[in-house]
């Protein structure tokens, strides 16, 4: 909608499906999203393309799937290899453990990660926590937002800052050495 630009977004390409004039495309896209929200949760759209296909076809085949990917088990496995998504293969630690480990690394109480302090140390710790939870272990922004008591958009902004901090701080890389990063 023009508020933020995120890597991988193809805004103009998507909006062209709605109208060739950007102003009207935005209006129609907004209505499209509102209409979808009004339909509520639909079981046939939950669980990834392959999972839905297997469920509705009655097949009992066990294949790899990822609810974010539409495609066969082979396609999903190939994407995992190409994009290095090991967090999908290993169980992620609970969010409270991630928060606790980052808080310990910063020498602060884990409960203080939920406070809205703008002090640099707390802000950096929240950013690193957001980055690790989302990019290393595949947590949703909404789950991280609830755990840290911040907004989903705040999580995305914090994760962006946290990535820079994480990548420039080798000691933070050892926090969760059992599951390599997806970046």
Image: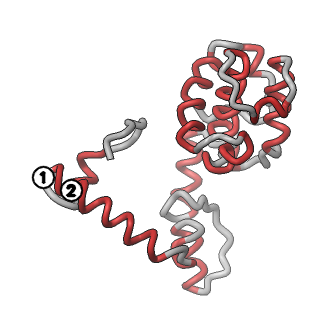
Q: How is the image coloured?
A: secondary structure
Q: Quadrant of the C terminus?
A: top right
The reply, left or right, for residue 126 in relation to residue 15 is right
| CA separation in Å, label 2 and label 1 | 6 Å
Question: Image quarter for residue 33?
Answer: bottom left
Residue 17, image x, y percentages:
22, 60
Q: Is residue 72 left or right of residue 121?
A: left
Q: Secondary structure at mark 1?
A: loop
> What label does residue 25 carry, if any?
2
> Residue 166 at what x, y percent from top left?
66, 20
Q: Is residue 136 above or below residue 119?
A: below
Q: Quadrant of residue 56?
A: bottom right
Instruction: Name the foreground residue: 27 vs 11.
Output: 27
- Mark 2 secondary-structure assignment: helix
Query: Which residue lies under the disc numbered 1?
Result: 21
Taking 54 as reference, is 129 left or right? right
Residue shown at 28%/53% (left/top)?
14
Contact (CB < 8 A) between labels 2 and 1?
A: yes
Query: For the point 72% across and 24% down, which residue is it?
Result: 125
Instruction: Depth check: give the residue in front, 77 or 109.
Output: 109
Few, some or many residues within 10 Å of mark 1 (<14, 14–19, 20+): few
Rendered view: 183 above or below 171: below
User: Is 60 on the left or on the right of 99, as rendered?
Assistant: left
């Amino acid at each position: 909608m023009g508020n933020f630009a995120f890597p991988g977004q193809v805004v103009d390409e998507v909006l062209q499906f709605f109208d060739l004039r950007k102003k009207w495309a935005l209006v129609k896209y907004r209505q499209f999203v509102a209409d979808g929200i009004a339909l509520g949760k639909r079981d046939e759209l939950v669980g990834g393309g392959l999972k839905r296909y297997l469920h509705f076809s009655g097949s009992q085949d066990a294949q790899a799937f990822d609810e974010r990917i539409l495609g066969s088990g082979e396609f999903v496995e190939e994407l995992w290899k190409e994009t290095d998504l090991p967090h999908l293969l290993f169980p992620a630690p609970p969010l409270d453990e991630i928060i606790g480990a980052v808080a310990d690394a910063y020498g602060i109480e884990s409960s203080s990660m939920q406070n809205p302090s703008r002090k640099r140390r707390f802000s950096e710790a929240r950013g690193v926590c957001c980055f690790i939870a989302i990019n290393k272990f595949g947590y949703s922004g909404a789950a991280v937002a609830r755990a840290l008591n911040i907004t989903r958009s705040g999580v995305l902004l914090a994760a962006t800052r946290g990535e820079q901090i994480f990548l420039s701080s080798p000691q933070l890389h050892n926090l969760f050495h059992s599951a390599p990063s997806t970046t």
